[in-house]
Amino acid sequence: MALQLKKTVVMVGMMGAGKTAIGRAVADVLGVPFMDSDEEIVRAAQMEISEIFERDGEGFFRDREHEVISRLLEEGPCILSTGGGAFLAERNRDVVSEKGVSVWLRADLELLWSRVRHKDTRPLLRTPDPKATLTELLTARQPHYQNADLVVDSREDYSIPDMAERVVGC
Ligand code: S3P
């Protein structure tokens, strides 16, 4: 599909919602670049996210996240996947609303948990009861995600191409 994107489409939502997989598929469908703020941070730091959290703290990570999101929004239209905490920060919501279009990939707790439970890559879930932590994060974050421009439901029975079509059709 040859389509001239006017603004960057910013994928927001919880860890495990599928922002990266669906973002990549959307970028393929539209023939536009795909970027991922977590990947950019990891590349620049030459460390995994969990190492950055451990060594420099979450605040340091959030500052890098804001810098990367702001820079990528300046670089011209693309599909941009962001980490699950990015849209909580007002400074990120502001820059996204000024320069992009946000899409909240909404998924329920069980789907999120089924996707993240076997992975040890999310420092925020390194707690004695990660499912309870995920539940708390989802409850606390939903009001922020609701500020997104568009909402697309992510479900177990939707394939990635299905989801990409849903985002493109928004
Ligand atoms: C985070 C989600 C992660 C990553 C970091 C913090 C969060 O990204 O940015 O571990 O606060 O929810 P994904 O949403 O891509 O897992």
Image (cartoon, helix red, strand yellow):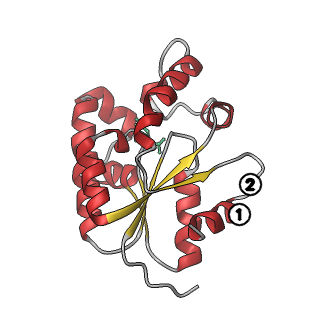
> In which image quadrant can residue 49 be found?
top left
**Quadrant position of the C terminus in the picture:** bottom right
**Quadrant position of the N terminus in the picture:** bottom right
Which residue is at a point 41% across and 45% down the rendered structure image?
Answer: 83
Residue located beneath label 2 in the image: 158
Q: Position of residue 150 (x, y in %)?
A: 49, 57
Which residue is at a point 67% across and 37% down the rendered structure image?
Answer: 111
| Crowding at mark 1 (Cα within 10 Å: few <14, some 14-19, many 20+) | some
Q: In this view, does 66 lie to the left or right of 130?
A: left
Residue located beneath label 1 in the image: 162
* Cα distance between the residues tagged 1 and 2: 6 Å
Q: Which amino acid does label 1 sit on?
A: Asp
Q: Could you say which is closer to the camera, residue 146 or residue 99? A: 146
Residue at the farthest top position: 128
Q: Position of residue 69 (x, y in %)?
A: 29, 56
Q: What residue type is labelled 2?
A: Tyr
Q: In this view, does 46 lie to the left or right of 105?
A: left
Q: Do the residues labelled 1 and 2 touch (CB within 8 Å)?
A: yes
In the rendered view, tell whether residue 59 sits above or below residue 131.
below
Q: Could you say which is closer to the camera, residue 2 or residue 33? A: 2
Q: Position of residue 72 (x, y in %)?
A: 29, 64
Q: Position of residue 47 (x, y in %)?
A: 33, 42
